[in-house]
Image (cartoon, rainbow, N blue to C red):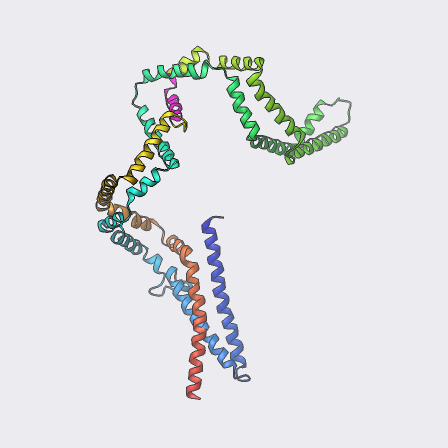
Amino acid sequence: MHPDVEKAAALRRMKNIALALLIAMAVIFCFAFAFQQQYPWLQYVRAAAEGGMVGALADWFAVTALFKYPMGLKIPHTAIIPNRKDEIGASLGEFVETNFLSEEVVSEKLANTAIAQKAGAWLAKPESAQRVATEGAAVVRGAMAVLNDDDVQDVIESLVRKHVVDPPWGPPIGKLAERIFRDGHHHALVDLLVDRSTTWIRDNHSTISGLVAQRSPTWVPQFVDGLVGDKIYTEFYKFARAVQNDPNHEVRLKLDAYLKDLAQELQHDPAMIAKAESIKAQVLGDPEVRELAGNAWTAIKSALSEAVEDPDSELRRKFASAVQDFGARLVEDPELAAKANKWIADAAGYLVGTYKHEITSLITDTVERWDAAETSQKIELQVGKDLQFIRINGTVVGSLAGLAIFTVATLVFH
């Protein structure tokens, strides 16, 4: 469920609780007021209920006045948020700028944080270095863009011939397929195909029955065709549902066995390997390779970028190792860490001092663009649930205050 939906439900629930307490106080008040002459002790109950109603109504007015006009009445100093949203946004931006984006605050915080040492400890971890290497691969892709196209195309053609055209396709494809089939990764695709087939059968009763009627002899009565078509459809759909619902159905097991045999044949059966080579020759002959190298430079650059990002490539390993060494130096070399911390503090101070108005303008501009009613709804959705406790507390405190005032007055004047 979306968080806003959950918050809206919680807000409605708290509003209902607060309203229920007010109604309960009103009912108790009416009962106590009606029978207090017969039962004098009900005067205390009436006073408590009366105070509870006053507290509940007062706090309802106060909470409601923040977000809208109470009961639609345009009373002064109500609907505060929708009427003053721009001032609120400006004040919030000014507050953030003054208290969070001052150079003194940022410099003091960075001085006590030791960012270089913490960053070094993070970079020294193998998984962190791998993450940085992944991001660095994007820089490599950018560098490839400045290479000479003709030279790169020659390299691409030689790489394609060496790694794609010359090696046989059957064994590596079979090995990959064997791993996929062994781990059961193909089951999701099989499930999808079975589900789609079952759905199609379910929704095409007339099509299946029509095929039966078209292929039956002309001398067979139509009602017989209909009965036979219905029977075939029912059995066909029942069979499809059985395959769909049973992970160990014979059809699934047969399909698994066939795919595993195919993976083995691609690796070890000379005839199947020859078929794979024939397909490869049809797809990637000499003209196709030259065309690929000459006209698909953009696609090849993408492929080379993926190769650079290979986690097991030499470049990636060396880059990740360099990142780890640099992180270790930041932790172990105080002089280097001090230089890095000073550079970070200077850069942060410059950014804050130069662009703090632009940063805080994001707050004020965003609030200004909001519709007044939408702003009120957004804020009420975030804090309205907690504000309803004010109504509940007002009811309870009002009851206790009414009871206390009435008790003291009774003791003093009677």
The quarter of the picture where residue 264 lies is: top right
Residue at the outermost bottom position: 414
Q: How many marks?
A: 0
Report the magenta residues as a range. Answer: 294-307
Residue at the outermost top position: 286
Residue 311 placement (x, y as % from top left): 41, 29
Prevailing secondary structure of the magenta residues: helix
The quarter of the picture where residue 381 lies is: bottom left
Q: Is residue 87 above or below residue 228?
A: below
Q: Is residue 395 left or right of residue 334?
A: right
Q: Is residue 92 left or right of residue 64?
A: left
- Within the magenta stretch, is there residue 342? no
Residue at the outermost front position: 332
Q: Is residue 216 left or right of residue 153?
A: right
Q: Is residue 62 above or below residue 326?
A: below
Residue 98 placement (x, y as % from top left): 25, 53
Q: Is residue 230 left or right of residue 369?
A: right
Q: Is residue 81 above or below residue 45?
A: above
Residue 167 placement (x, y as % from top left): 47, 15
Q: Which residue: 27% across, 51% down?
A: 100
Residue 161 placement (x, y as % from top left): 42, 14
Task: Point out the image quarter for the C terminus.
Answer: bottom left
In this orientation, which residue lies closer to the viewer: 252 or 369?
252
The quarter of the picture where residue 324 lies is: top left
Q: Which residue: 32% across, 16% down?
A: 151
In this orientation, which residue lies closer to the viewer: 252 or 124?
124
- Within the magenta stretch, is there residue 299? yes
